[in-house]
Amino acid sequence: MNGSTVSGATSNTFTSTKLAYKNTVQCGVSPFDGDENGKEVTSNIVTISNTAPVMSKVVLTPDPALTSNTLTCTGSGTDADGDKLTYKYQWFIGGKTVSGATASTLSSKLTSKGDSINCAVTPNDGKTDGKSMASNVVTIGNTAPTVASAKLTPDPAFETSTLTCAAGTTSDVDGDKVSVRYGWTVNGTVKKNCRA
């Protein structure tokens, strides 16, 4: 191996944990008639090729996810040659490739409620790409709407006053239409619930 005789290697097969990328291996064959060896003949030289890395796991988080969440694609792989790995990322929404999305994260600006999203990771050992592996599929869920404030008038109020509860500005990151529900309590006891 690499021009040196491997001690103890005398069978017609050879495996070794010491074999590495670009090692050169050659075998020699000597005929033996029971009394003496004939002249050894050497084989062609084989150069050990790079072994492509292999993905072990790909996980997309968070799951479940909301429109406001940045999604993160995390992958891990192994390499038989012991090379340090880097990873390439690809994102899909509804099975279609997201153009330009090649980082390990996907911005919430690119997602909407109801989107089915997954990612794929391809390992690279500095020489060769391995086979890509797809993640779990995450469906973007509903984000609850918000209301900025609530104001009760008149203040002060009297026994004969009609009280009015005014809702502040409502918003919904999913773009859904928002209605408002009102709840009333007197001395801590719920009195009435209705929808505006």
Image: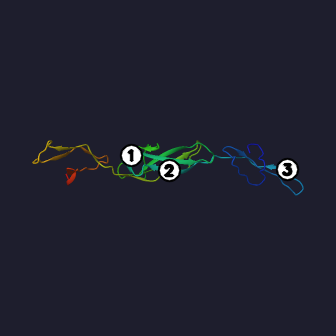
**Residue found at the far right of this picture:** 35
Find the distance from the CA under tag 1 to the CA under tag 3. 73 Å
User: Mark 2, mark 3: which one is toward the viewer?
Assistant: 2
Whether residue 66 sits left or right of residue 131 in the image: it is left
Q: What element carries label 2?
A: strand
Q: Is mark 1 on a helix, strand or loop?
A: loop
Give the mark, 1 or 3, whose residue is nearer the N terminus.
Answer: 3
Image location of residue 32, percent across then percent down? 85, 55
Q: In which quarter of the image is the N terminus?
A: top right
Find the distance from the CA under tag 2 to the CA under tag 1. 19 Å
**Residue found at the far bottom of this picture:** 34
- Mark 3 and mark 2 in contact (Cβ < 8 Å)? no
Image location of residue 50, percent across then percent down? 63, 46
Q: Which residue is drawn at 90% across and 56% down?
A: 35
Dot 1 crowding, Cα within 10 Å, few <14, some 14–19, many 20+: some
Callout 1 amino acid: Asn
Residue pointed to by mark 1: 69
Residue pointed to by mark 3: 39
Residue 58 numbered tag? 2
Dot 3 crowding, Cα within 10 Å, few <14, some 14–19, many 20+: few
Q: Is mark 3 on a helix, strand or loop?
A: loop
Q: Residue at x 51, y 47 (%)?
A: 75
Image location of residue 138, percent across then percent down? 42, 52
Callout 2 amino acid: Val
Image location of residue 187, percent across then percent down? 20, 50
Front position in the image: 154 or 109: 154
Callout 3 amino acid: Lys
Find the distance from the CA under tag 2 to the CA under tag 3. 55 Å
